Amino acid sequence: MFGKIHVFVPSIEAAKKVFTNDFGEFNKGYIKSMATVVGEKSVFAVPIESHTRIRHVLSALFSMSSLSKFVEKFDQMLSQRLNKLEQNGKTFPVLPFTMKLTLDSMCNMLMSITEESLLQQILSDCAAVSDALLSVPLMIPGTTYYKGMKARQRLMEIFKEMIARRRSGKEYKDDFLQYLLERDSCPSSEKLEDSEIMDNLLTLLVSGQVSSAAAMMWSVKFLDENGEVLDKLREEQLDIAKNKQRGTSLSMEDINRMSYGLKVRQSEPNQFYT
């Protein structure tokens, strides 16, 4: 692939070995287009000495408190959209639905963006960036790479304007971007420059959207093909719902009670190879 030997690592233990050794035995080998499209300050592209610092700051996004907030928001968003689809009574393709859902939820969690026109623009530009990640890096009008780089420029302008409004005090939101901006007084090893923030916001959007959306799509497919698994999963969900007030959002405690759901989720990657 791309003129080099690639080894795919499907096991959790091997993946941990690769990602936790801080490039002692394994180094990054991203192709040029990936590094330039997401940005030179992205955690994907920075040198080793910056990678650990950026990764440490970004890890707050995956803290238990952040995940708890995200679970509730995501559950509300998903429920509202599924209810609307049910009311319309029409079939719909799963992947476009999950792609829009994941991007909207990430924009909400990261930057509190809820305006539909802006979300549509970000969705379109992120799609162009994703397409350009593995493209031939030719900055020629009409090429996939060119379109991706232009989309990147538009996204950077959106992020730049948003950061400027936050820094001027015209806007305040309780989200991950605000958390990053409020770390200005921290030591240099515990904060990010604005360029690093913008490149890594894009990285989080692009890397998280496709993988999450595809995982949900495959979940729907495999559950449809395995009725007995779907029945047991539904039974577990209904049991959890019985102990909650009607209309109450899902919580991390509920997620932790989904022992069968966890087994189903862990078994899905194996389905890709069968």
Image: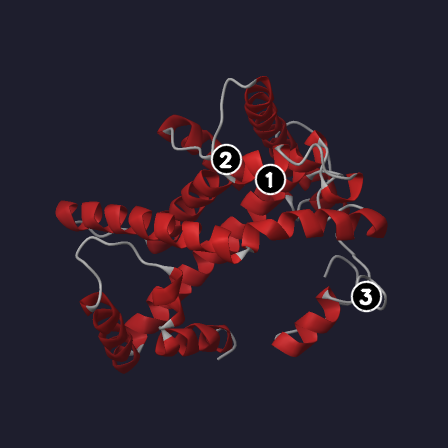
Residue drawn at point x = 60 percent, y = 39 percent: 201
Q: Which residue is mark 2?
A: 111
Disc 2, disc 1: CB below 8 Å? Answer: yes
Quarter of the image for residue 137 reads top right
Q: Quadrant of the N terminus?
A: bottom right
Residue drawn at point x = 26 percent, y = 46 percent: 81
Disc 1, disc 3: CB below 8 Å? Answer: no
Residue drawn at point x = 26 percent, y = 51 percent: 79
Numbered disc total: 3
Q: Which residue is mark 1?
A: 201
Q: Nearer the viewer, residue 72 or 6?
A: 72
Q: Amino acid at mark 1?
A: Leu
**Label number found at residue 126:** none
Q: Which residue is mark 3?
A: 26
Q: Amino acid at mark 2?
A: Met
- Colour scheme of the rendered structure: secondary structure
Horizontal and vertical percent for residue 33? 72, 43
